[in-house]
Image (cartoon, rainbow, N blue to C red):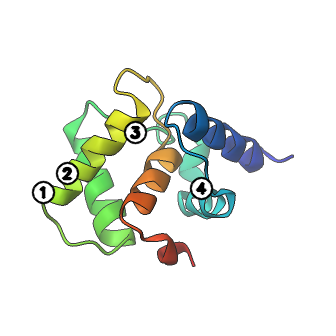
C-alpha cells in the first residue's frame, strides 16, 4: 500500500468516526488526488479552521474555482457547517476530508467525473 492509499484510508476513517459519514471511496480518492502534493505536507494537508485567510482560501480556490460555485453567504455557511460536522475542537481537519464534505454538500460529484 502506497503513502497516498494510507492517507485515503486515514481520511475515510475520519469521515466515519468524526463526521458520521460512510465515504464514497471512489469520490474520496478523486478528491484526494485533486489536492495534489499538499496531502504530503503536514501544514498544507490540514485546514486551519480558526484562521479566516485559510477559510477564504477554501472558499475561493476550492468552492469557487474548482467547483464553480458563485460567491455568496451560502459558501461561508457551508464551510462553517462542515467545520462543525468535523468537530471544531478536532485539531487536524484534513483538507481532503473538508473538500469531500463540501463536494457532497453541494452535489458537485460530477466535477470529479
Residue identified by numbered label 3: 47
**Does the CB distance between marks 3 and 1 fall below 8 Å?**
no
Query: What's the distance in space between the residues labelled 1 and 2, CA to CA?
Result: 5 Å
Q: Earlier in the sequence, mark 2 or mark 4?
A: 4
Q: CA distance from mark 2 to mark 3?
A: 15 Å
In the image, which disc is placed on residue 76?
2
In which quadrant is the C terminus drawn?
Answer: bottom right
Instruction: Pick the residue in front: 11 or 43.
Output: 11
- Please give the name of the residue rendered at 59% of the width and 53% of the height, measured from the top-left corner: 37
Nearest to the eye among marks 3 and 1: give it: 1
Tell me which residue sits at (61%, 56%) in the image.
28
Q: Residue at x 63, y 58 (%)?
A: 24
Above/below status of 109 relative to 78? below
Q: Which residue is mark 1?
A: 73
Between disc 2 and disc 3, the foreground one is 2
Q: Is residue 41 above or below residue 87?
A: below
Mark before the other along the chain sequence, 2 or 3: 3
Q: Is residue 5 visible?
A: yes
Query: What whole-number distance in Å separates the C-alpha atoms at marks 2 and 4?
Result: 22 Å
Residue 10 in the image, given as x and y percentages of width and height: 66, 37
Amino acid at each position: 500500500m502506497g503513502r497516498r492509499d494510507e492517507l485515503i484510508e486515514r481520511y475515510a476513517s475520519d469521515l466515519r468516526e468524526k463526521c458520521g459519514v460512510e465515504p464514497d471511496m471512489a469520490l474520496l480518492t478523486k478528491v484526494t488526488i485533486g489536492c495534489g502534493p499538499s496531502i504530503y505536507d503536514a501544514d498544507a494537508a490540514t485546514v486551519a479552521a480558526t484562521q479566516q485567510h485559510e477559510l477564504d482560501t477554501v472558499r475561493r480556490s476550492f468552492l469557487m474555482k474548482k467547483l464553480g460555485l458563485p460567491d455568496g453567504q451560502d459558501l461561508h455557511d457551508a464551510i462553517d457547517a462542515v467545520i462543525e460536522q468535523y468537530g471544531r475542537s478536532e485539531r487536524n481537519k484534513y483538507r481532503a476530508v473538508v473538500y469531500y464534505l463540501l463536494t457532497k454538500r453541494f452535489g458537485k460529484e460530477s466535477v470529479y467525473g
